[in-house]
Amino acid sequence: MNAPRQTSIKTVETVLVELYSDGFVRSYASKNVNIIIINRPHAATLEGGMLAEQLIDDILPFNFKAVYFPGMIRATGQLKRVTPTSIKRRLERIDLLHSLNFSGDAWRKPHLGRARFSAGFWGQNL
């Protein structure tokens, strides 16, 4: 007789990393996730980059060394300043794309979503 096939259930832990414009970093995850945040020293030369890599390797706790290599990278990003004006411009571009998608001509029929900016963004007139 065939033995019943065992299936393993893989769980994926969710981690959120929040970057503040002043350099502060906050991470969110369930309690069974270990997170550390390292600050890579700036290096202007190849030799400096190698020294920074060695420093990180020296200070990294042992249980994190198994995940600190390129094959384990799950996401990358870059810190950019986000202002109310940049959010407004981004939302206006999204509204324009939606208008083009639904009407075929954004200038003939404006998208109703633009009305949210009539009173200003976060109480400010931009």
Image: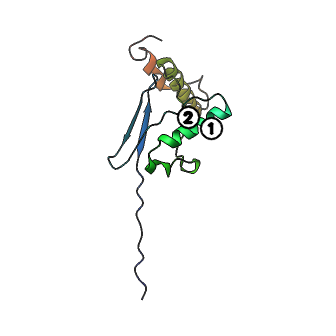
Across and down, in percent, residue 14 comes to 41, 46
Label ID, residue 50: 1
Q: Nearer the viewer, residue 18 or 66?
A: 66
Identify the element where label 1 is drawn. helix
- Circle 1 residues within 10 Å: few <14, some 14–19, many ≥20: few
Residue at position x 62%, y 38% in the image: 50
Q: Nearer the viewer, residue 59 or 24?
A: 59
Q: Earlier in the sequence, mark 1 or mark 2?
A: 1
Above or below, 44 against 75 in this view is above
Label tally = 2
Residue at position x 53%, y 23% in the image: 92
Across and down, in percent, residue 90 comes to 53, 25
Across and down, in percent, residue 6 comes to 41, 73
Q: Which residue is mark 2?
A: 102
Q: Amino acid at mark 2?
A: Phe
Residue at position x 46%, y 23% in the image: 21
The quarter of the picture where the N terminus appears is bottom left
Q: Amino acid at mark 1?
A: Met
Q: How is the image coloured?
A: rainbow
